[in-house]
Image (spheres, helix red, strand yellow):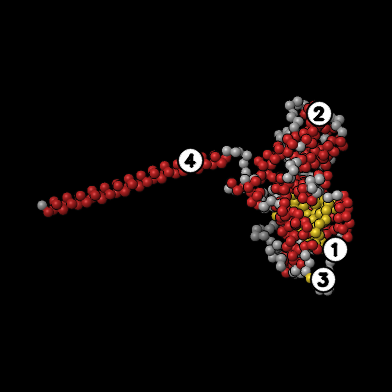
């Protein structure tokens, strides 16, 4: 897609900006977090020798980031566009999160911005006395409850359910392809061999920083490979974002502004080349397929409802037609989505790729013109998918605009089915869907099966012999009794 086409699409999107919003999906990365791995595990020191309490956990800054994002989204989609209700309606929004604390807490923090204090549940006066659990409540607690007045929770706090994505079920997202780990490792190794940008970056990093870092670590045994650079940049970006003092790193004299640019560059290369470096974007497609099929499913249901002019408010029991799908994920999941779009919409032009920093958000806004569609005779007719548009934003930047029909036509054939994913990851060969890097596991399973079969046969044979012995013994006893009776009769006869 050329810059002229993108410019024209941008104009088109602004021309329909006042139209009706029909469906919305947001997919965002968690907020600022601690580094995911320690260099010194016992001292909780990361790769720049900063101390953290818990690796990978969301920080207070990360919570603030998503609270601010929630406030901004509320202003746009609730206060300005009037798309969602003022108070949380569980039938309007479906919220998913991967099964990590940092994504769950990011979703919860953002929802406090969407639905802040004073928007939660209110109790009627007659309900207050009955709103108690089935345990003894002390007087000081009763006083606190009395101070709540009619608010269900302090400050009329609003709560929203967050559905956790269970990776073992493989329903929507395969976070970082961990369920398909051996394939992921295999593909990354292949990409690293064939993509020169990564090798060059790691080599340049080693030549530039290894001497001063060895002095900082007081250790000359550090291996400066791609895994080290990955962990080091992860630690530095986290510490820089968190405004850590970085006392050890400061003493090295490294220019931290330049280092930050380099680490963001590496992070982008990590996803663009290391994860999705093959021409088919295999891992990007693998990770994106389930989330896009989920998005298309709910989008179609909402559009069909709009086309048929159904009164959605009367059919809300099964949560099947939400106005909004919200997914709390990772830089990996957003990057996979982007690289999938690079393949489908941009003919593998990687210049489109934008690396998702902490609390980045992508949004799919489905819009249509407000009002009826009429034929040449002025008769009202049903709209089609050609009358609905997908506007895709990365943060506030419009990336593309297509009709829903054109979007589906391009995307659906490129997605992998569950059966294809199962075959590729070898889920269909193992009960429970877990994979293994051990090529001999199937043989081990067969050997175990044969051993159990032999053991069962031996036990069965022994059991059968015992039964036969008991039967024979019982028959002998009966025979002996019969002989004794016969002898007695013979004696009496004499």
> Percent from the top left, x then y, of residue 56?
74, 42
Closer to the camera in the image, 387 or 371: 387
Q: Is residue 447 above or below residue 72?
A: above
Report helix, strand or loop for mark 4.
helix
User: Quadrant of the rendered structure where residue 218 is?
Assistant: top right
Q: How far apart are marks 1 and 3 (CA)?
A: 20 Å
Residue designated by label 3: 375
Q: Is residue 269 above or below residue 372?
A: above
Q: Name the residue under label 2.
A: 207
Badge 3, how many Cα within 10 Å: few under 14, some, many 20+? few
**Label 4 or label 2, whichever comes before in sequence order:** 2
**C-alpha span from label 4 to label 1:** 69 Å
Classify 10 Å Cα crowding around label 2: few (below 14), some (14-19), many (20 and above): few
N-terminal label among 4 and 3: 3
Question: Residue 19 shows which numbered tag?
Answer: 1
> Residue 108 in the image: x percent, y percent?
76, 53
x, y percent for residue 125: 75, 67
Q: Nearer the viewer, residue 220 or 179?
A: 179
In terms of sequence position, does the residue under pointer 4 or pointer 1 come before the other? 1
First reached walking from the N terminus: tag 2 or tag 1:
1
Circle 1: is it few (<14), some (14-19), or many (20+) Cα within 10 Å?
some
Q: Distance between the residues labelled 2 and 1?
A: 55 Å
Foreground tag (4 vs 1): 1
């Amino acid at each position: 897609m050329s810059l002229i086409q993108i410019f024209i699409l941008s104009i088109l999107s602004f021309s329909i900006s006042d139209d009706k919003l029909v469906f919305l999906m947001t997919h965002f990365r968690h907020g600022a977090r601690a580094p995911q791995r320690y260099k010194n595990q016992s001292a909780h020191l990361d790769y720049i020798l900063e101390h953290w309490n818990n690796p990978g956990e969301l920080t207070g800054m990360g919570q603030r980031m998503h609270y601010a994002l929630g406030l901004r989204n509320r202003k746009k989609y609730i206060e300005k566009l009037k798309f969602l209700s003022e108070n949380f309606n569980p039938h309007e929004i479906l919220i998913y999160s991967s099964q990590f604390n940092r994504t769950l807490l990011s979703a919860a923090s953002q929802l406090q911005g969407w639905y802040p204090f004073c928007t939660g549940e209110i109790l009627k006066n007659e309900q207050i006395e009955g709103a108690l659990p089935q345990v003894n409540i002390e007087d000081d607690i009763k006083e606190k409850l009395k101070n709540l007045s009619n608010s269900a929770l302090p400050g009329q706090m609003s709560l929203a359910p967050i559905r956790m994505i269970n990776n073992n079920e493989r329903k929507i997202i395969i976070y970082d392809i961990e369920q398909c780990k051996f394939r992921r490792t295999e593909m990354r190794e292949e990409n690293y061999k064939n993509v020169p940008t990564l090798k060059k970056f790691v080599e340049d990093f080693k030549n530039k920083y290894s001497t001063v870092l060895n002095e900082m670590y007081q250790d000359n045994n550090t291996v400066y490979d791609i895994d080290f650079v990955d962990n080091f940049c992860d630690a530095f970006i986290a510490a820089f974002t968190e405004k850590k003092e970085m006392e050890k790193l400061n003493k090295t004299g490294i220019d931290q502004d330049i280092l930050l640019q380099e680490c963001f560059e590496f992070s982008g290369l990590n996803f663009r080349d290391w994860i999705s470096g093959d021409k088919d974007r295999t891992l990007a497609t693998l990770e994106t397929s389930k989330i896009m099929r989920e998005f298309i499913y709910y989008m179609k249901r909402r559009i069909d409802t709009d086309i048929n002019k159904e009164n959605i408010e009367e059919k809300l029991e099964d949560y099947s037609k939400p106005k909004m799908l919200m997914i709390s994920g990772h830089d990996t999941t957003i990057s996979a989505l982007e690289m999938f779009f690079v393949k489908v919409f941009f003919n593998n032009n990687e210049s489109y790729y934008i690396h998702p920093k902490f609390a980045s958000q992508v949004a799919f806004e489905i819009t249509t013109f407000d009002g009826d569609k009429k034929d040449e005779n002025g008769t009202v007719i049903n709209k089609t998918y050609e009358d609905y548009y997908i506007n895709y934003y990365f943060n506030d930047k419009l990336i593309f605009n297509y009709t829903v029909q054109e979007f589906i036509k391009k995307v659906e054939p490129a997605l992998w089915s569950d059966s294809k994913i199962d075959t590729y990851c070898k889920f269909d060969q193992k009960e429970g869907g877990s994979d293994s890097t051990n090529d001999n596991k199937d043989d081990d399973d067969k050997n175990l099966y044969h051993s159990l079969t032999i053991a069962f046969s031996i036990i069965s044979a022994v059991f059968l012999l015992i039964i036969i012995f008991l039967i024979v013994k019982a028959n002998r006893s009966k025979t002996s009794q019969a002989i004794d009776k016969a002898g007695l009769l013979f004696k009496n006869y004499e």
